[in-house]
Structures are given as structure tokens and as C-alpha cells.
Image (tube, rainbow, N blue to C red):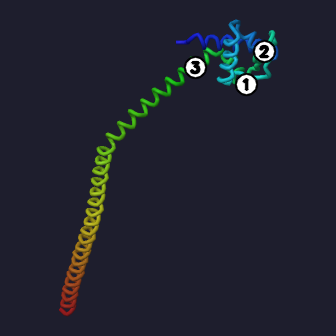
């Protein structure tokens, strides 16, 4: 909700931007009393929308009246280019609303993370320990399997060598028997 002051600043900034060389006196910015004219220039300067130049001094009898003169600032030029003071205020309001929502969202995320840290850590440790035990069991069974295979191979090798030795012995017996038969037959 915009107030009267913001509307006055918007109108004064627009008049200042339309003035020759973007320089204007307080008289040209507002058609109210002298204190209001000075106040509007001060508001523009406080919001960094204008820069103060030398005051114009009017002498009316014994009274000196200072009328401030100002020139639009680079920030004021950007605001005028982007739609004016009122649009700038709406944009700033939107930015602050987003920042507040982001702050609330970040708070909720941090709260959730703090509540779920320990359960997730414990679950992760459990999984890590379980996989470590599985790995250890696989390695030990692999070593046991390799040892048993090597012993089986040794036994098979021994048994096959024993069988081959037996075959050789049997062959030798057969050969010796056949030699003796042949010798006996030759003698006859």
C-alpha cells in the first residue's frame, strides 16, 4: 500500500527527469508551501535519487528564502528508466518478501536436517558395518575355498600319480610276465 509521500516522491522524480539537464528547483517539483518543497528535495536526496546543488536565495523584504536546487542522480535515472519510483517500490517489496520466504525455508530445512542427522548417521554406520562384515566373510570364504581346492588338487594329483604308478607297475608286471612266457616258449 503506497502512501501519499511515495506518490509525491514519484511525481517529483518524474518532473526532475523531464526538466532541462535534469536540474530543477524545489518550486518546479511541487506546488505546495515552501517547507513541503524543501522536504521533497530532501526526500529525493535522502533516497539518493538526486544530488543537491547550490540553493537559490530569494529576498522578500527582510526575509531570505532558500529554494534548494537538485540534479537527478544515476540511481534516479535508473529508476526512471525502469518504470519509476512506484514500480521500484513494488520491486523492492517483492524482493523483501522473497528474502523473508527464503529465510523461513532455510530455517525449516536446517531444523529438518538437525532432526534427521543422528538417525541417518546411525543407519549409514549400520550399512557400512554390515558391508564390511560381508566383505570380510567373502574374503575368508574365498581363501578357504582356495585352500580346499589346493588340497583337493594335491590329493587328486597324489591319487592320479599313485594310479599312474600302479598302472606303470601293472604294466611292468604284465611285461615281465609276458617276457617270461616268451622266454619259456622259446626254450621249449
| Label whose residue precedes the other's in the sequence (2 or 1) | 2
Of tags 2 and 3, the one toward the viewer is 2
Which residue is most to the front? Answer: 62
Q: What x and y, as percent, mark residue 161?
A: 25, 77
Residue 144 placement, left or right of 16: left
Residue 61 placement, left or right of 165: right
Q: Residues at badges 2 and 1 in contact (C-beta under 8 Å)? A: no
Separation of marks 2 and 3 at Cα, in angstroms: 41 Å
At 76% from the left edge and 20% from the top edge, which residue is drawn?
71
Residue 64: mark: 2
Q: Residues at badges 2 and 3 in contact (C-beta under 8 Å)? A: no
Q: Which sits in the foreground, 166 or 112?
A: 112
| Label whose residue precedes the other's in the sequence (1 or 3) | 1
Residue 91: mark: 3
Q: Which sits in the foreground, 21 or 141?
A: 21
State the image quarter where residue 74 is shown.
Answer: top right
Residue identified by numbered label 1: 74
Q: Quadrant of the C terminus?
A: bottom left
SS assignment at label 3 = helix
Amino acid at each position: 500500500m503506497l502512501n501519499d509521500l511515495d506518490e509525491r516522491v514519484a511525481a517529483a522524480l518524474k518532473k526532475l527527469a523531464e526538466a532541462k539537464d535534469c536540474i530543477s528547483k524545489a518550486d518546479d517539483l511541487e506546488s505546495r508551501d515552501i517547507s513541503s518543497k524543501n522536504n521533497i528535495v530532501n526526500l529525493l536526496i535522502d533516497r539518493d535519487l538526486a544530488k543537491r546543488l547550490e540553493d537559490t536565495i530569494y529576498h522578500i523584504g527582510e526575509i531570505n528564502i532558500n529554494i534548494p536546487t537538485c540534479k537527478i542522480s544515476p540511481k534516479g535515472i535508473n529508476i526512471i528508466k525502469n518504470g519509476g519510483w512506484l514500480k521500484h517500490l513494488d520491486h523492492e517489496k517483492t524482493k523483501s518478501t522473497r528474502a523473508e520466504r527464503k529465510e523461513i525455508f532455510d530455517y525449516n530445512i536446517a531444523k529438518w536436517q538437525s532432526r534427521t542427522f543422528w538417525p541417518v548417521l546411525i543407519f549409514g554406520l549400520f550399512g557400512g558395518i554390515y558391508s564390511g562384515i560381508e566383505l570380510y566373510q567373502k574374503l575368508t570364504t574365498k581363501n578357504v575355498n582356495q585352500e580346499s581346492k589346493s588340497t583337493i588338487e594335491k590329493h587328486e594329483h597324489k591319487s592320479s600319480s599313485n594310479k599312474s604308478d600302479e598302472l606303470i607297475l601293472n604294466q611292468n608286471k604284465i611285461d615281465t610276465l609276458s617276457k617270461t612266457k616268451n622266454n619259456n616258449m622259446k626254450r621249449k
